[in-house]
Image (spheres, rainbow, N blue to C red):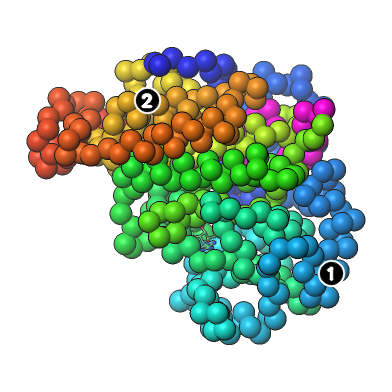
Amino acid sequence: MGCFPCSGESSSSKKQERKRKVNSSDNRNRRDDREKTQADTLKVSPPKFVKEDHAVVNQSAAEVASRQLDDDKVPCNGDARTFKFIELVDATQNFKPENFLGAGGFGKVYKGHLPDTGEIVAVKQLDHNGCQGVREFLIEVLTLNMAKHPNLVKLIGYCAEGDQRLLVYEYMPLGSLEDHLYGMSSSTGDNTDPRPNRKTLDWNTRMQIAAGAARGLEYLHDQMSKPIIYRDLKCSNILLGEGYHTKLSDFGLAKVGPSGDETHVSTRVMGTYGYCAPDYAMTGQLTFKSDIYSFGVVLLEIITGRRAIDNRRTGSEINLVAWARPLFKDRKKFHQMADPALGGQYPVRGLYQALAIAAMCVQEQPNMRPLIADIVTALNYLASQKYDPNIDPIHCPNIKSKRDGEQKRGMGKDNERTKLED
Ligand SMILES: Nc1ncnc2c1ncn2[C@@H]1O[C@H](COP(=O)(O)OP(=O)(O)OP(=O)(O)O)[C@@H](O)[C@H]1O
Ligand SMILES: [Mg+2]
């Protein structure tokens, strides 16, 4: 398993604009550039909300539904509630700063309390100056109203009153995977905001999270009556509940997948830099395998503790996939890929297998990437294989492993960090 069939190199990006959507405005006819370009060809710019052919709702349906939302009617058969703006003002104590949970392209998110049901909720308020908009709001409501699964965040309701657009979700008390992996606020994107009470995710929890995210994606791809391409899979959209129960969130970019003989959906390139499949970025042809690539990037982040795009690094280390590809080919280097924060506490076989899955997902050729059902099977198995550092050795590239837990744990961490930072 030391060598994986990964073709080509992924170029690193020049810019990091994590909070913006990638929008490569017109690259559908640029297939001749395939060898030259990957992430570098993506123009990172504030997103445009464009008419698309096969969105979850098409433009005219969106307009109709938008009018329905304005009239306080639920646009389809789901059970999302409609809220008056004043109810959400009350629920969040007038969007009190203490209730602030984070912010993204859509706007700010606040913790709230619904007095009638006693539910704790997360209220996301559209920022009209922000880079996402009413169209995403609508697609989010319609998608989540149709999609119900234990690994998808529950939409409790929405408010569409005048200019106000708010989404009300179940509250996920452990925040996002991004917060846990990088220990910082996803809203700021810098490393000056370490959140308290976040402990390093151990190996077992990481595999549990990866398996939960995969099951959420499997539901979208394989189990919905109209299968959906998510298009926005990334660590900040993977939310965590009690016991690290994993749920996918943010479906504003979701699209109904190709049907019948169609192999893809043609669309403008939207997504987040670093997670966008190179084939989709170059051609605008969206497939279920575009999500699989994004999943592979997320899995790599879970294993390595490295960001998809990290501008604090240099050269090929900026882009996680570009950094990982040569390492996939050399089994001896696999240990270098494990997150140093794990302190060497991971199962060797489990690491190899998780890396094998990630490597298959980020392959350049979309048809070489696995189906989500196979990924779920593999990750469910990995998550079921519990690692116990008191039984299994602690791994460190520089020192011989011993079963002497406490002593080694400290040494492993320090030595591994030193080696990797050198
Ligand atoms: N249901 C929720 N429960 C608890 N916290 C949440 C919930 N939804 C969002 N958050 C918090 O709010 C933050 C911002 O979420 P949001 O989805 O608006 O932005 P993002 O995912 O960082 O970026 P993007 O707009 O590109 O999706 C999340 O990282 C998370 O910490
Ligand atoms: Mg999000």
Mark 1 highlights which residue? Answer: 68
Q: Is residue 265 magenta?
A: yes
Name the image quarter holding residue 245: bottom left
Q: Under tag 2, what secondary structure?
A: helix
**Where in the figure is residue 23, as x and y percent of width and height?**
72, 43
Q: Does 168 sit left or right of 74 as displayed? A: left
Name the quarter where the C terminus is drawn.
Answer: top left
Viewer-nearest residue: 190 or 6: 6
User: Mark 2 CB in 8 Å range of ligand 1?
Assistant: no
Q: Under tag 1, what secondary structure?
A: helix
**Where in the figure is residue 235, as x and y percent of width and height?**
50, 47
Vertical position of residue 41 compared to residue 73: above or below: above
Quadrant position of ligand 1: bottom right
> Residue sitting at 20 percent across and 33 percent down?
392
**Where in the figure is residue 401, as x and y percent of width and height?**
16, 28
**Where in the figure is residue 308, as x and y percent of width and height?**
50, 39
> Residue sitting at 53 percent across and 43 percent down?
215
> Residue sitting at 79 percent across and 75 percent down?
72
Which range is magenta? 261-281
Q: Residues within 10 Å of mark 1 (few under 14, many from 20)?
A: some
Q: Is residue 162 visible?
A: yes
Name the image quarter holding residue 264: top right
How many numbered circles does the render carry? 2
Question: Closer to the N terminus: mark 2 or mark 1?
Answer: 1
Amino acid type, residue under disc 2 in the picture: Tyr
Mark 2 highlights which residue? Answer: 352
Amino acid type, residue under disc 1 in the picture: Gln
Q: Residues within 10 Å of mark 2 (few under 14, many from 20)?
A: some
